[in-house]
Amino acid sequence: MLSVLRNRTYRHLFTAQVVALVGTGLATVALSLLAYDLAGANASAVLGTALAIKMVAYVTIAPLAGAVAGRIPRRALLVAMDLTRAGVAVALPFVDQVWQIYVTVFLLQAASAAFTPTFQATIPEVLPAEKDYTQALSMSRLAYDLESLFSPALAAVLLSVVSYGWLFTGTTLGFLASAALVVSSVLPKAAPAERGGGVYAKAAFGSRLFWATPRLRALLALDLAVAAAGAIVFVNTVVVVREHFHRPAGAVSLALGAYGAGSMITALLLPRLLAKASDRRVMLPAALALPAILAAVTAITAAPAGTGTWIALLAAWALIGAAGSAVLTPGGRVIRRSAADADLPAAFAAQFSLSHACWLLTYPLAGWVAAAAGLPVTALVLGVIALAAALGAVVLWPRHDPQAFEHVHTDLPADHPHLAGAHQARGGFEHGHRYVIDQHHSAWPHAARGRAAAGH
């Protein structure tokens, strides 16, 4: 897998991603401590609101960022967002009011909402070979998982010698280092977009692309399944560990570590697995496993606490991490094959926005149901959502899902450049090629015996 790092541009971009993630992880720890200083016992409410603001920023800003990405050189956009995040991090130690936390979190996450989809859309152009891109997706998954383990440990070491305010300095340095690495990279020039319209029309295109493409509709359903299972891990782990199993605070890290270990092991295995099996054959079974795991969690949390059920919980968390990684990691491949090169920023921005909308639904649901009805009911409710989403993905993603279709254009003139090589048939001009939704293909064709018709 590490062979992909021989590509200098990708090596710099991946390193930029890692150092920025570490900086973000340090900021997460420091913000928790800052919230406690400012709000005391109400710190959980403050952090819960901040998390909601983060998701709102992701959902609303990412599509707009994807719309303007084609108008701004990618390197300039990525560096500007890193510098914005560094500037916000510099201001965080001076925050002394709760409302200021909310403002700074929104600014920080708005910059991330512009940075991340642009970064994701750049990687497939830096690594055009399918094998290399698959390895890069697994590397990215590993980076996220390792950050979730490494950053809290690094923060604990730093807090033993400095106050938490200095963690924001680490965050600033991380974003500045990311900006420097991006500056040192030679990024491919973005393909010119053929679509017209203003910013809002281009922002809406990403969402339309998802709704019009069957495999992308399935990908959105898969994101919901992962969000349903992941929410119980991220929202309820501390309650499960401390209140149900009555274990010490360190056991919370152990449970989250089990989740991360399952995700990392799967990410390491995926490049070899995806070389032999299609994305659909990997992602759908993994999604269907999630409701089964949540059913087991329902039984575990309903049973008396003991060593056996504790080990079972750790195994369940590891399996949720493994299944979630098997669904999320190949998602970039699905997006790549479903959009024209010029539309990749809009496609990744739409996926970023829509997937976080799923988390915006499941995060509060996991908290509210647990508080009102208990952990077993929470696992059951989230399991039902995961099951409905996974079954929806099975229905939405056709078993026969070729990339190229024979189709007919009925409204393009015979001399149109897009019709080069086409022949006249059925009241229009017929040809075949890799089919994606764009200005010449506004709807998905209805496949019939390997052929498809598309009226425009």
Image: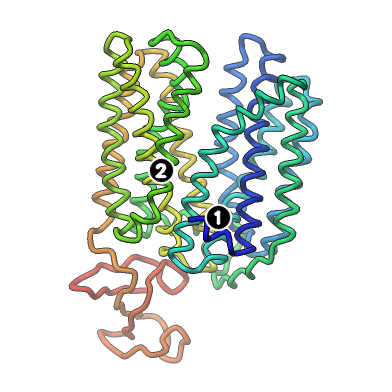
Q: Which mark is residue 210?
A: none
Q: Nearer the viewer, residue 118 or 4?
A: 4
Mark 1 Cα-neighbour bin, 10 Å: few <14, some 14–19, many ≥20: some
- Colour style of the rendered protein structure: rainbow
The picture quadrant where one finds residue 54 is: top right
Is 206 positioned to the left or the right of 171 in the image?
left
Q: Quadrant of the C terminus?
A: bottom left
Q: Nearer the viewer, residue 24 or 189?
A: 24
Local secondary structure at mark 1 = helix
156 up-or-down from 454: above or below: above
Q: Position of residue 444 (x, y in %)?
A: 33, 65
Q: Position of residue 32 (x, y in %)?
A: 64, 22
The residue sitting at 71% across, 15% down in the picture is 38
Q: Position of residue 297 (x, y in %)?
A: 30, 23
453 up-or-down from 229: above or below: below
- Amino acid type at circle 2 is Ser
Residue placed under numbered mark 2 in the picture: 325
Q: Nearer the viewer, residue 3 or 72?
A: 3
